[in-house]
Image (cartoon, coloured by chain):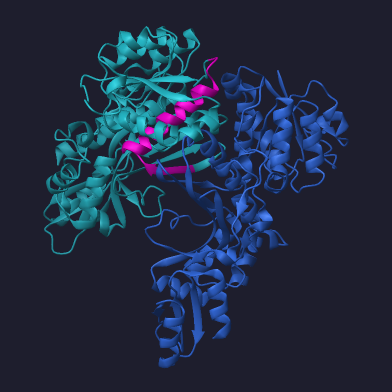
Chain colours: A blue, B cyan
C-alpha cells in the first residue's frame, strides 16, 4: 500500500486523482504497490463527490499522518505551498509537485532538505507538462556537458503567437480567443509577460549546471509588444515568431533570456504550434535533440506527476540525486550578452537607411511591399550597444 | 572506482571510450565514482594507441575479472554478442548495449537473467541513438497505457527519402550518395529493407506492453520500390514519404508494421529529415508527444550508453525493472489489419477509374499534370482485401 495526499484539487490535482484511478492496475504492475489517494487538502467541501470523504482542511492531518508516503503538491504559488512541502519533507514524506513557481523560488532549499531526510523531491510536471524534460536532463543525458537549452515553454503564449501568425490577428484579439477557450487566465500577465517561461528556463538551467539559478536575474520580455506587422516581416523572411526561454552554458557561466525570437523554418522548434511546447537540448556529445508535447493540460501534467509517484515507489528507501546543489550559478548580465536584433523604422530615407546599416553592424535591410517603413536585422551586437544605438536613432 | 569493459571497439565502442574520457569529471560528480575503462575486447591490436594496453582477445579475461563492474556491448549482431552478454550477466556484471539485433532477439531472456542475478541490463542506445526513448517509455511515461508508437527509427533510409524528396533523386542515386557519405553500408539491406526499423519497433512494443514481441511477426516493407513519381504525388498531396515503424496497442493486441507512409505536413514527424530520427508516443493520459534527435552517429549513441553507465552506477545494488516480462505478446497478422493505401495505375480510362474508386472503397483519385496515369488513395481496407483487389486489376 502506497498512500498519497493531494494538496489542492484544481485542474492538475483532480487530474492526478483521475490518472491514479484510471490506470490503477497498471500502476500496481509497475510498482508492486496499491497506490491509494488517502487524503485531499482543499478549502472546498465537494459535497456528494467521491472526494468528499478524503477531504481535510488542515495540513497537519497530512503531515502528522504516518501512513501517508507521498505528498502531491498541485496548489500553485509559493505560499503556503512552500511551507507545506517543506514540512512534508521534514516529516520524512516524499513530495512531487507540478508547481514551477515553487521549484524556481525554493528548489535548491527543498532538494537540500530532501537529501538530508533521505526522501525524494520530484518535479517532472513543473516544466513542459507531459514532456519528460526533467528526467531526460538528469538521467538520459547524465553524461553530457550541456551547451544550450532552448524552449517554447508556455502554451498560452504559443497559442496566441500561432493565431497571430496563421490568421493575422492582433495580440489583443488572439489573447481574447485564448481566454475564451480557457488557454489564458483572466489576468494573463504571468504568461504574456514571460514570467512563467522565465521560471521554467531557470529550473532547466539549475538542472543543467547543478547550481542555483536565480530566476530574477534572467532578462525577461513578453509578447505584448508584438504587432501584426512583425508577423508580415517574419513571413517575408520565412520565419515565425516564438517566445523562447533560452540558456547557453559557457565557461561556468549562464547566458539566459526570455524573449520573442524569429525562428527559421528549418529549426526543430518552428513546427511547435498552438498550445504545444517543445524543448531543444544541445549537449557536447549528443548534439541536438528535441522533445515535443503537451506543455500543460490536466491529464498530460497529471501523467507526469504520476510518473514521479512511480519513481518514488521504486526509490522509496532513498534519495535520488538530481545533481542540483547549493552553490549559486553566475548568470551573465543581459547588457553584456550578444545577439542579432530585428528592428523597424518609419520611412524609407536612403541616407538614413545606409547610416543605420552601418551603426547596427552591417545590418541587413528588409522591405515589405507598399509600406513606408523598413526593418533591419542587425549584425551580432551586445545588448547594451544595441539599446544605445536605438536610442540615438 | 567503477570499472568498465567495452566489447567491440567500432564506431560506438570508441565513442563510449571518448565520452568517458572527455566528460570524466562530470561523470564522477554525477555518480560519485571514478569511471574507468579497464578492458577492451577486440580482434585487432591497435598498436601505438592509448587502447593498446587495455586490449584483450579472450572474453574470459573480462567475465572472470571480479573488478569489472559493467560490460558495454557494442559489437553488433547476435552471436557471439548474445553469449558474451549472457555470460557477463550470469557472472553478476551489469551490462549496457547499443545492439538492437541482440535486444530484439534475446531481450526477454537477458532481462530475465538480469532480474535473477539482481544486476541491470540496459539498452537505451539500441533504439533512437541519442533520443532517450527507452527511459521515457519505462520511467517518464510509467503511468500511461500506450495507444500508439510511431517512429522514424532509421537514419539511413530517412536520409535517402529526404534526398529523393528534396532533390528528385532516384532511390539508387540517393543510396549511392548515402554510401559515399558513410550513412549507408556497402550492403544496405538491413536498412533499406526495413529490418533495422522492424527490430526497433519490436523493442519499443515490448516495453509498451511488458511482453515479448517477436520481431519476425511484424510485417516489414522497405523503401526500395519507391519511385521518384511517388514523391511527385506526395508533394501534390502536401505530404512527404517516410519509413514508419508503427505499433498500435488495443485490447491486449499489437498492430504493428514497418512501411513507407505518406505523412501530412502538420504531423509532428513530417519535419524529421536527413539522418535524424523522431518517435511519436500516444498515451491514454498524456496525449501525443514526440522526441527528436540523432538516431545514430558515434557520439550521440555513445552518450546514451554512458547515460546507462551512470544509471547503473546509481543502481549498482539492485535490478531496475523495465516491466518487460516473459509472456508472449500477440501480434495481429498484417492481413487482418486495416489501412488506407496509395496505389498507382497506368492510363486514364474513365470507366476503369470509376470501377477502381468503387472497388477500393470510395477511393479518392489523384492526377499529376501531363502524366498518362492516375493514383488512388483508398478508403480504409483490410490488407488482405486490398491485396486481393489489386490482384484483380
Between A151 and B197, the one lying in front of the other is A151
Query: Residue at 40% across / 50% down in the picture?
Result: B267
Q: Give the quarter of the image for residue A238.
A: bottom left
Between A262 and B18, the one lying in front of the other is B18
Left or right relative to A374: residue B348: left
Q: Is residue B296 magenta?
A: yes
Q: Is residue A139 magenta?
A: no
Residue A228: % across, % down: 52, 75
Query: Residue at 66% across / 29% down in the picture?
Result: A21
Residue A8: % across, % down: 77, 41
**Relative to B350, residue B11 above or below:** above
Q: In the displayed orientation, state which residue is furthest to the front.
A: B48
**Relative to B108, residue B198 above or below:** below
Q: Give the quarter of the image for residue A256.
A: bottom right
Q: Looking at the image, can residue B141 be seen?
A: no
Left or right relative to B355: residue A71: right
**Relative to A295, residue B338 above or below:** above
Query: Residue at 40% across / 16% down in the picture?
Result: B108
Give the magenta-colored segment's residue range: B289-318
Left or right relative to A239: residue A121: right
Left or right relative to A148: residue B276: left
Residue A350: % across, % down: 40, 92
Q: Quadrant of the C terminus of chain B?
A: top left
Residue A346: % across, % down: 51, 87
Q: Give the quarter of the image for residue A327.
A: top right
Query: Residue at 61% across / 65% down in the picture?
Result: A221
Between B199 and B328, the one lying in front of the other is B199
Q: Looking at the image, can residue A105 be seen?
A: yes
Between A313 and A207, the one lying in front of the other is A207
Amino acid at each position: 500500500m502506497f498512500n498519497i495526499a493531494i494538496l489542492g484539487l484544481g485542474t492538475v490535482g483532480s487530474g492526478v486523482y483521475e490518472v491514479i484511478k484510471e490506470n490503477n492496475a497498471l500502476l500496481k504492475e509497475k510498482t508492486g504497490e496499491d497506490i491509494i489517494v488517502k487524503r485531499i487538502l482543499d478549502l472546498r467541501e465537494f459535497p456528494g463527490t467521491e472526494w468528499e470523504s478524503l477531504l481535510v482542511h488542515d495540513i497537519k492531518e497530512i503531515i502528522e499522518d504516518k501512513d501517508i508516503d507521498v505528498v502531491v503538491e498541485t496548489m500553485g504559488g509559493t505560499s503556503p505551498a512552500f511551507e507545506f512541502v517543506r514540512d512534508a519533507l521534514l516529516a520524512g514524506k516524499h513530495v512531487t509537485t507540478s508547481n514551477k513557481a515553487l521549484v524556481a523560488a525554493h528548489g535548491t532549499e527543498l532538494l537540500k532538505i530532501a537529501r538530508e531526510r533521505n526522501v525524494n523531491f520530484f518535479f517532472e510536471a513543473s516544466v513542459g507538462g507531459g514532456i519528460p524534460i526533467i528526467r531526460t536532463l538528469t538521467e538520459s543525458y547524465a553524461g553530457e556537458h550541456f551547451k544550450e537549452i532552448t524552449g517554447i515553454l508556455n502554451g498560452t503564449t504559443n497559442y496566441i503567437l500561432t493565431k497571430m501568425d496563421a490568421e493575422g490577428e492582433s495580440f489583443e484579439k488572439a489573447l481574447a480567443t485564448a481566454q475564451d477557450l480557457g488557454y489564458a487566465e483572466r489576468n494573463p500577465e504571468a504568461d504574456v509577460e514571460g514570467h512563467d517561461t522565465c521560471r521554467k528556463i531557470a529550473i532547466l538551467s539549475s538542472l543543467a549546471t547543478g547550481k542555483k539559478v536565480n530566476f530574477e536575474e534572467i532578462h525577461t520580455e513578453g509578447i505584448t509588444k508584438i504587432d501584426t506587422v512583425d508577423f508580415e516581416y517574419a513571413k517575408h523572411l520565412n520565419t515565425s515568431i516564438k517566445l523562447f526561454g533560452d540558456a547557453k552554458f559557457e565557461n561556468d557561466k549562464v547566458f539566459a533570456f526570455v524573449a520573442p525570437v524569429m525562428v527559421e523554418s528549418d529549426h526543430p522548434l518552428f513546427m511547435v504550434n498552438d498550445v504545444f511546447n517543445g524543448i531543444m537540448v544541445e549537449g557536447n556529445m549528443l548534439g541536438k535533440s528535441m522533445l515535443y508535447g503537451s506543455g500543460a493540460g490536466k491529464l498530460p501534467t497529471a501523467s507526469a506527476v504520476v510518473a514521479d509517484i512511480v519513481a518514488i515507489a521504486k526509490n522509496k528507501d532513498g534519495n535520488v540525486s538530481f545533481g542540483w546543489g547549493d552553490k549559486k550559478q553566475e548568470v551573465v548580465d543581459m547588457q553584456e550578452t550578444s545577439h542579432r536584433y530585428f528592428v523597424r523604422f518609419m520611412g524609407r530615407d536612403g541616407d538614413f537607411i545606409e547610416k543605420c546599416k552601418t551603426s547596427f553592424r552591417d545590418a541587413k535591410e528588409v522591405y515589405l511591399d507598399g509600406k513606408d517603413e523598413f526593418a533591419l536585422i542587425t549584425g551580432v551586437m551586445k545588448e547594451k550597444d544595441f539599446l544605445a544605438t536605438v536610442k540615438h536613432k
